[in-house]
Amino acid sequence: MKLVIAPLVLLLGCVALAQETPATLNPDTDTPSGFGLLLGYKSVPVKQTFAHDTNPGDSFLPNANVPGSAGTTSLNRAQYIDFGLRYETPLRDKSKWSLNVDASGLFAYTSGNGADSSGMNLDDRQNANDNRPAANAAFIYTDSNWGFDAAIGVNYSFSKHFYAGAVGDFSGVYVDNGWDRYSNFQSQSGKWVLVPAGGPKLGWRMTESIAIEGTLLFGRNGVGLNAGLVGHF
């Protein structure tokens, strides 16, 4: 819950900061310049499936020594809170074209364990070889709670309020796989999943300092999404 409340506080702070700062649009081109804050939602297609061995502490379970005996978990699409920085500059004097470079951290949350667990990216299920009641059973999981994102975009300002462009994006998310037993997550393995993608962007400037922006990102694992606020200093 804290990881949900914190981004909302940051979002309100971003809006308040942008409202108090001077206008950042070039009156001749309707393009912003300088640094800004990013805060939004990011969906990353990762398409990961993991076959779990039975935990050595559960050797009494059927086929415990068989690889993959505990079952499989998967994470097809990971969701994150996206928080970072942007630098934007016109491509040349008196041009409606601008270039932006973004760098962000990606954050998700997980809570609880076993049958009571939940999370933005958590697949937590009872062992395939454990038929005990859920309160006493062993569980396996796949989860992802953090990552990074870098992007470069080219934008064209149609007016003071609307702009569009194209984005090249590169996300890296850490996917963790393991056992959920005795109210503890025990990692069996982890890997970085790297997702290059690109696609179109649309933006609406609510004020001269604050914009709502959305991007569709097409990559080898499917279509991702990035949507949120940009608040220029």
Image: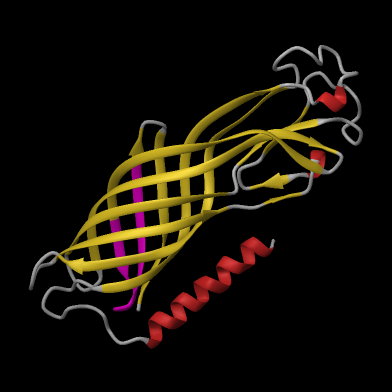
Residue at position x 75%, y 12% from top?
66
Q: Quadrant of the N terminus?
A: bottom right
Q: Return the x and y of residue 200 as percentages of the image width and height.
A: 27, 48
Quick check: is 213 in the magenta stretch?
A: yes
Residue at position x 43%, y 63% from top?
84
Q: Please identify the dominant SS of the magenta region.
A: strand
Answer left or right for 36 relative to 79. left
Answer left or right for 207 relative to 165. right
Image vertical order of residue 65 relative to residue 156, above or below:
above
Image vertical order of residue 207 relative to residue 78, above or below:
below
Image quadrant of residue 231? bottom left
Count of all numbered marks drawn on residues in the image: 0
Judging depth in this view, the residue of 225 and 162 nearest the camera is 225
Answer left or right for 15 relative to 124. left
Quick check: is 87 in the magenta stretch?
A: no
Answer left or right for 84 relative to 23. right
Q: Return the x and y of residue 181 as percentages of the image width and height.
A: 83, 36
Q: Return the x and y of residue 60 as percentages of the image width and height.
A: 90, 18
Q: Return the x and y of residue 26 as percentages of the image width and height.
A: 17, 78
Image quadrant of residue 191? top right
Residue at position x 50%, y 43% from top?
173
Describe the colour scheme in one phrase. Answer: secondary structure
Residue at position x 65%, y 41% from top?
122
Span shown in magenta: 202-217
Image vertical order of residue 20 relative to residue 233, above or below:
below
Q: Quadrant of the C terminus?
A: bottom left
